[in-house]
């Protein structure tokens, strides 16, 4: 271990966002389906949402003047890391139930892990964010783990 | 779905050619303002890319579409694990495809390896999708 991660940075593990509640509309599903090049009529008609639609539904909508110069919003769930260059990350998603127009869904994100590894060209920091999306009955609809790598 | 899944079977491939309009609509749909996707001077001069970078999750969506179109109404995707390894650029033609790697005819549970690759055969986004056929 290279000891990049301070106790302060590691103390953010377990931190959670406030739950974000959004409504699914047919129009939003249709826009998403068209934009992704979908060819399935059920998605193009907005009868049901394609997988990954939850990315659209829960992308942070923030005022323009809070975006960084490269146009990216600041994820307040994350601490300031000692490495900042983002490398490829990964997604691990489970789909528990279909998403349909009229559904109210609530997402909660948790910073579930931060760790470091020695890479070929130096130290790497990994962090994981878990997102749980539930319907108003409290049932799990989508669960997602994002892993990001910093160098 | 036709024919029935067999381990090792390749799914029909699909070419995607993301132009600047699709790229704009996709990022607008997400509310993604990251300049590398639409600001050519920024993407090339500041970030050093060869062009406008196709949004990573769009490649993830194309992985899903390969399996979803093949399944049609015969089943649904239950999970995916994937990563974005290499960038795709606006104007480039990429190919999405997949192969059945596990299939249990009794339960209808399926596992597939999926990919998006460019015309140099570089895998941009590899993934593993699980799906469940209706029984």
Image (cartoon, rainbow, N blue to C red):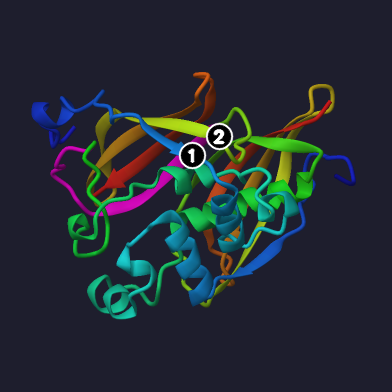
Q: State the residue at coordinates (54%, 45%).
A: A52
Q: Looking at the picture, how far across and down is residue B2, in whole percent?
A: 89, 46
Q: Residues within 10 Å of mark 2 (few under 14, many from 20)?
A: some
Residues shaded magenta: A78-94
Examine the structure image and report whether residue B105 is included in the region drawn in magenta.
no
Q: Is label 1 in contact with label 2 (beta carbons under 8 Å)?
A: yes
**Rendered view: A121 above or below B118:** above
The answer for which chain carries disc 2 is: A
Q: CA distance from mark 1 to mark 2?
A: 6 Å
Please say whether residue B79 is visible from this viewpoint. yes
Classify residue B99 as left or right of residue A146. Answer: right
Examine the structure image and report whether residue A91 is included in the region drawn in magenta.
yes
Evaluate whether label 1 is on the same chain as label 2.
yes
Q: Secondary structure at mark 1?
A: strand
The circle on residue B18 is: none
* Quarter placement of the C terminus of chain B: top right
Towards the viewer: A5 or A39: A39
Please say whether residue B86 is visible from this viewpoint. no
């Amino acid at each position: 271990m290279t000891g990049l991660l301070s106790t302060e940075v590691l103390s953010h593990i377990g931190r959670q966002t406030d739950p974000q509640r959004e409504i699914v509309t047919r129009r939003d599903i249709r826009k998403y389906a068209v934009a992704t090049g979908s060819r399935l009529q059920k998605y193009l008609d907005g009868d049901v949402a394609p997988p990954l639609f939850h990315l659209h539904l829960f992308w942070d909508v923030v005022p323009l003047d809070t975006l960084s110069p490269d146009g990216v919003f600041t994820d307040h769930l994350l601490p300031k890391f000692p490495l900042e260059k983002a490398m490829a990350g990964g997604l691990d998603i489970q789909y528990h139930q279909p998403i349909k127009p009229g559904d109210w869904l609530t997402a909660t994100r948790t910073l579930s892990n931060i760790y470091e590894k020695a890479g070929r060209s130096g130290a790497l920091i990994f962090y994981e964010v878990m997102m749980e999306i539930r319907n108003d009955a409290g049932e799990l609809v989508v669960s997602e783990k994002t892993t990001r790598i910093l160098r | 779905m036709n024919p029935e899944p067999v381990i090792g079977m390749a799914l029909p491939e699909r070419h995607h050619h993301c132009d600047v309009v699709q790229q704009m609509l996709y990022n607008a749909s997400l509310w993604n303002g990251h300049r590398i996707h639409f600001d050519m001077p920024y993407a090339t001069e500041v970030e050093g890319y060869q062009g406008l970078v196709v949004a990573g999750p769009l490649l993830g969506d194309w992985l899903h579409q390969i399996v979803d179109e093949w399944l049609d109404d015969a089943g649904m995707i239950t999970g995916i694990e994937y990563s974005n390894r290499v960038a795709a650029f606006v104007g480039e033609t990429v190919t999405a495809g997949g192969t059945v790697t596990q299939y249990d005819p009794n339960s209808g549970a399926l596992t597939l390896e999926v990919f998006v690759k460019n015309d140099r055969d570089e895998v941009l986004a590899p993934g593993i999708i699980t799906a469940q056929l209706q029984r």
